[in-house]
Amino acid sequence: MPTLLIWHGYKFRFYALDRGEPPHVHVVKDGKSLKVWLERMEVSRNVGYTDREIERVLAVIAEHRKEWMEAWNGFFGI
């Protein structure tokens, strides 16, 4: 499970078992979880985050989207 970034306690990561799904990132902090599709920049699943937190997290993902897409492809051998 590669961790891509830790930002203000938010951990942005992939899970090895996500092979076969479109590129996405999981964001975890304090028992909360968010899954965001990287290509569409859409929230797939939210457990506990407020709209304001999601807005901040999406801005961080947008900044790193290209490099994380490349990391996804490298990690999964695509």
Image (cartoon, rainbow, N blue to C red):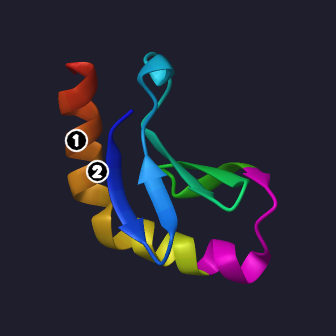
Instruction: Please state if 56 lies on the left or on the right of 14 as rendered.
Output: right
User: For residue 50, which numbered disc appears in the image?
Assistant: none
**Residue 34 in picture, x, y percent from top left:** 65, 53
**Residue 26 in picture, x, y percent from top left:** 54, 47
Q: Name the residue rendered at 25%, 57% in the picture.
A: 66
User: What is the crowding at mark 1: few (fewer than 14 residues within 10 Å), some, or many (at least 20)?
Assistant: some
Q: What quarter of the picture does the C terminus occupy?
A: top left
* Residue 65 in view here: yes
Query: Magenta stretch?
Result: 46-55
Numbered disc total: 2
Instruction: Please state if 28 lies on the left or on the right of 19 as rendered.
Output: right
**Residue 5 in picture, x, y percent from top left:** 34, 61
Give the amino acid type for the residue marked by disc 2 in the picture.
Trp
* Element assignment for label 1: helix
Marks 2/1 in contact by CB < 8 Å: the verdict is: yes
Instruction: Report which residue position mark 1 lands on.
Output: 71
Residue 20 included in the magenta stretch of the image:
no
User: For residue 68, which numbered disc appears in the image?
Assistant: 2
Q: Name the residue rendered at 51%, 52% in the picture.
A: 40
